[in-house]
Amino acid sequence: MLSLDDYAAIFAIIGLAGVLLLASPTLGFVLRLSGSERFSELYILGPEHMAEGYPFNVRAGEEYGVYVGVGNHMGSSSYYLVYVKFRNQSDPLPNVTAGLPSPLPAVYEHRVFVEDEGVWESFLRFSFSGVSRFGNQCFVESLNVNGSAFTVNKTAFWDAANRGYYYQLFNELWIYDPEYGGFRFHNRFVSLWLNMSIS
């Protein structure tokens, strides 16, 4: 037969197990499992804040816009750099297999701190000026991003298969590495194809 002390020990164990069961959802927010995946996300949404309606057929003198966002799932607050770059169909994109950014210069940048499990988002407005066509070429002199003009001097050649002059506006994600003492390419980029063949 069990003594009173034995019953007290059993009730204490059952009570402790009950407290741990009730507290486990809260503990999930406080304690991180060491095996959880750490990553960052980079995305573009259309002007209606949806994954549709992206600008495609563009012309000089008109303003277009998209939302650019970064999600942080790195396990702590992170300092990000988002470069905006512009290319024609022959300029190099980032090489995610080798972990290398595009060597093209950035025309615009965002520097943001994002807390763990947080999201940063900004509306990116852009327009073009100095657009001319001659023969089978289209030349873009200037790209305006969020009210600042940048000289790009990009020539695209007529793409007969897709019937257009194609450019790409893309964003690269970089993250601050304290061990390195600077920003490193975070192996993520997103882009928009733009057809400059309409007058």
Image: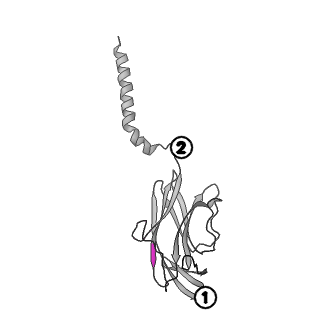
Compared across the picture, whether 190 is left or right of 17 comes to right
Compared across the picture, whether 187 is left or right of 56 comes to right
Report if residue 120 lies within the magenta region: no
Residue position for label 1:
135
Disc 1 element? loop
The kind of residue tagged 1 is Gly
* Residue displayed at 60% across by 74% down: 89
Circle 2 sits in a helix, a strand or a loop, which is it? loop
Instruction: Please determine whether, in this image, residue 13 is positioned above or below residue 2.
Output: below
Magenta region, main secondary structure:
loop
The quadrant in which residue 17 appears is: top left
Q: Amino acid at mark 2?
A: Gly
Count of picture labels: 2
What residue sits right under mark 2 in the picture?
A: 35
Quarter of the view holding residue 109: bottom right
Start-end of magenta stretch: 45-65
- Which colour style is shown? one colour
